[in-house]
């Protein structure tokens, strides 16, 4: 296993002081980078571990914050913050750009080789960065199939991979259809994987607090979705074997 280093990074966004988690591979050379967005509950050890796993694969990874260092385990509190956020593409883009600026300021990254991957609200933010014309090599979103400004999807300049559970009541078939129609009309290189039998947040290990109805962990599909994300990065943002040696 490659030795990695991690640190907390503090930065302003959305009127809050955000606390992101930056993971760096060993060495001093420039590497491709991944911006990693969390579910609506906010940054947790789940996303920190994912960032660390990406660093072990050779990427610089920043797991960004949504709520000023807080994790919103209360579903009502989470909804009260996230629903207005998800309805406001400019706010989502502001949060994404602030994190992207932090990532770009890291001297270890290759600024021309960045991908954005997110889950739920974090995935919606990754998509909004694409719609805002950000130069990304890939976008991956799990459960975050928002279509706030579909007329701007033509500004997406990279492949888009999306994953969703077939039984997700928060991202039902009508939402999936709107997303795929948007991507297709815009001429985006897109893929959608529907994981059979999976609920919303199927990728997230069980938590010790109340969750919304329709939310549940599916360990097999969680592993498959992670492999799909890694494959997307390997295709669009490869790290050569000599860099990982």
Image: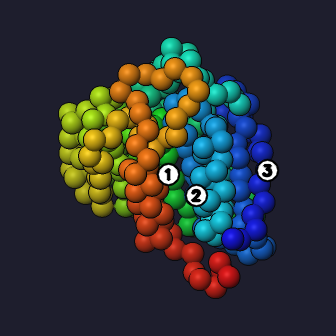
Asked if the residue at tag 1 contacts the one at tag 2, i.e. Cβ–Cβ closer than 8 Å, the answer is yes
Eye-nearest disc, 2 or 3 = 3
Mark linked to residue 34: 2
Please tell me which residue lies in front, 178 or 42.
Answer: 42
Q: Residue furthest bottom?
A: 242
Residue 158 position in % (x across, y down): 40, 61
State which quadrant residue 81 falls in.
top right
Does residue 160 appear to the left or right of 92 in the view shown? left
Asked if residue 25 is positioned above or below residue 40 in the image, the reply reads below
Please say whether residue 197 is visible from this viewpoint. yes
Q: Quadrant of residue 30?
A: bottom right
Mark 2 and mark 3 lie on one chain; the one further toward the N terminus is 3
Q: Quadrant of the N terminus?
A: bottom right
Res 122 visible = no
Which residue in the structure is indicated by mark 3? 7
Q: Residues within 10 Å of mark 1 (few under 14, many from 20)?
A: many
Closer to the chain start, of discs 1 and 3, is 3
**Viewer-proximal residue, 198 or 67?**
198
Relative side of 197 to 121, left or right: left
Q: Position of residue 137 (x, y in %)?
A: 47, 63
Element marked by disc 1: strand
Query: Could you tell me which residue is drawn at 77 percent across and 54 percent down?
Result: 6
Cα distance in 3D space between marks 2 and 1: 7 Å
Q: Which residue is mark 1?
A: 117
Is residue 87 shown left or right of residue 58? left
Mark 3 Cα within 10 Å, few/some/many (few <14, many 20+)? few
Q: Earlier in the sequence, mark 2 or mark 1?
A: 2
Q: Position of residue 123 (x, y in %)?
A: 46, 43
The residue at 78%/60% (across/down) is 5
């Amino acid at each position: 296993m490659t030795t990695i280093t991690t640190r907390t990074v503090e930065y302003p966004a959305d009127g809050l002081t955000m606390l992101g988690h930056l993971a760096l591979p060993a060495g001093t050379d420039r590497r491709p980078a991944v911006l990693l967005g969390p579910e609506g509950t906010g940054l947790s050890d789940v996303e920190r571990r994912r960032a660390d796993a990406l660093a072990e694969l050779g990427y610089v990874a920043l797991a960004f914050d949504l709520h000023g260092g807080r994790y919103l385990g209360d579903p009502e509190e989470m909804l009260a913050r996230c629903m207005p956020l998800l309805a406001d593409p400019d706010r989502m883009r502001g949060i994404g750009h602030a994190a992207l600026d932090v990532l770009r300021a890291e001297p270890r990254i290759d600024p021309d080789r960045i991908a954005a991957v997110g889950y739920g609200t974090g995935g919606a933010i990754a998509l909004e960065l694409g719609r805002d014309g950000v130069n990304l090599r890939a976008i991956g979103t799990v459960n975050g199939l928002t279509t706030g400004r579909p007329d701007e999807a033509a500004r997406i300049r990279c492949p888009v991979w999306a994953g969703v559970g077939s039984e997700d009541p928060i991202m039902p078939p009508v939402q999936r259809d709107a997303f795929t129609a948007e991507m297709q009309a815009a001429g985006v290189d897109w893929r959608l994987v529907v994981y059979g039998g999976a609920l919303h947040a199927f990728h997230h290990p069980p938590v010790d607090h109340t969750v919304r109805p329709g939310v549940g962990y599916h360990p097999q599909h969680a592993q498959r979705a992670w492999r799909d994300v890694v494959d997307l990065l390997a295709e669009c943002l490869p790290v050569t074997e000599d860099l990982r040696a």
